[in-house]
Every structure is written in C-alpha cells, then in structure tokens.
Amino acid sequence: GNSVTQMEGPVTLSEEAFLTINCTYTATGYPSLFWYVQYPGEGLQLLLKATKADDKGSNKGFEATYRKETTSFHLEKGSVQVSDSAVYFCALITGNQFYFGTGTSLTVIP
Amino acid sequence: ETGVTQTPRHLVMGMTNKKSLKCEQHLGHNAMYWYKQSAKKPLELMFVYSLEERVENNSVPSRFSPECPNSSHLFLHLHTLQPEDSALYLCASSQGYYGPSYEQYFGPGTRLTVT
C-alpha cells in the first residue's frame, strides 16, 4: 500500500546549523510529494512540493528533491533559525489519496 | 478573509452538549476535508467532500456529523462526545479531489476539549 515514513523526532539544533529531516515513501503510480509545516497553535502550511522525479521544491531556504530511485524526499536547510521551530510533515498524493507522515518536531535554540 | 478559516478556534464542551465547528474556504476550491489531530498520533482523515458530495467517511463514529451546504462551507456537528474526542480538528480544501497537483490548504484548526 501507500505510506510515508519520516524520521522520529524531536530534533534539536543550534541556530545556523544544517537541517536534514528524512522522508521515504511507498506508493503505486507516480505520486506528488509535499512538505508541510505546523507552527505552534496553527494549522498545517504547505512549505514546498515536487510533482515528478528529480524535481526540486524550494521555499524559505528549505529544499527537497524527489528521488524516485531511493523513494525519498528529504527536507534540508543550510542554516536554521529560531523561527523555524515547528513540526514538519512529509506527505504524498496519489490519485485521490493523501498520505501524511507522523511529523518531526524541530526546536532551534539560539 | 483569505485562505481557509475555522471557527471557533477553541471549544470546551461537556459530553451531553451539541456544538458545531465551521470551516470556510476563500480559494474557490471544490473539495473540502475534516482531519483529527491528536497528540502523538498521525493525522486522521475523517471526511471528504467533493463538489458538495461526501466521497469519504473513514469509519468515523456517528457522534460526528458533517455537512457541506456549498463548496465554500463545511461544518462538523458534534453531539454526545467522549473525552477521547478531545483534539485539534483541522479543515482543509483543495482545488480538486483527484490529481497529483491537488495539494491541500489547511485552516488554523479548532482546539476541542471534551469534559
């Protein structure tokens, strides 16, 4: 079946550190892949997306590349800020089905 | 208003109360969703409406009753809830219900506490 697996949290980093949050997926067909971010007390916001293999999604300094060969869509940022503290969700859509990962909590300390 | 709005943002209700959650999308989308987000659990899809017709109902107890009077509005009617129903209820919308580019846009959620 279809599923999304992302790394367990919580993740704690110092400001300006490099961030990687791993996400792998299992899907039939050709899914589109997404990263969502949820700040405290808010709903999920779309952070970036990629709709086909080798596409790179980017936004606010975050990047993720759709890797079909490794079925991965890892989220990266070169230098995190305190304001990036949030929960990050990897997700995929295939057909009419949306699948979310369990979320990875990130805390950035000054 | 822009995007997806939800009211109320916080709700405390007793187990014998009846209340409703409201969601409104200002994006011209044709599909709307209710999700339940509980602490330390994956996001749970509850209901999906496409063009005002319910297309998914994922084994949700009958004490939750959705209503979609038009493509911009979605309600979740609540009655005789249990304490384990306490959670963040998220509404989302998407341009369509089928297709690889139909990402979902979420509202801020209603934090529900059942006492």
Image: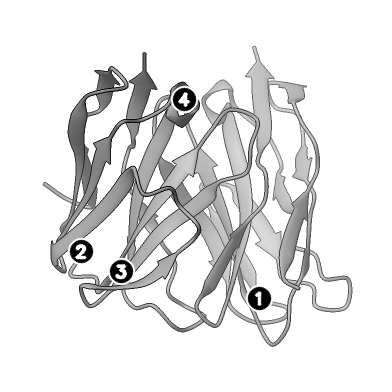
Up the image or down, B67 lies above or below B108; here it is below
**Disc 1 designates what residue?**
A55
Q: Nearer the viewer, mark 2 or mark 1?
A: 2
Report the residue at 28% width, 51% height from top.
Answer: B65
Q: CA distance from mark 2 to mark 3?
A: 15 Å
In the rendering, at what x and y percent does residue B75 appear? Answer: 20, 50
| Callouts 3 and 1 on one subunit | no
Q: Is residue B33 left or right of residue A83?
A: left
Q: CA distance from mark 4 to mark 3?
A: 27 Å
In contact (CB < 8 Å): disc 4 and disc 2: no
Q: Is residue B87 left or right of residue B112?
A: right
In contact (CB < 8 Å): disc 1 and disc 4: no
Q: Nearer the viewer, mark 2 or mark 3?
A: 3
Q: Which mark is residue B49?
A: 3
| Callouts 4 and 3 on one subunit | no
* Kind of residue indicated by mark 4: Pro
* Kind of residue indicated by mark 2: Leu
Q: Secondary structure at mark 4?
A: loop
Q: Secondary structure at mark 2?
A: loop
In the rendering, at what x and y percent does residue A101 appear? Answer: 67, 51
In the rendering, at what x and y percent does residue A1 appear? Answer: 76, 73
**Disc 2 designates what residue?**
B27
* Kind of residue indicated by mark 3: Tyr
Q: Secondary structure at mark 3?
A: strand
Q: Is residue A91 left or right of residue A11?
A: left
| Callouts 2 and 3 on one subunit | yes
| Callouts 2 and 1 on one subunit | no
Q: Quadrant of residue A13?
A: top right
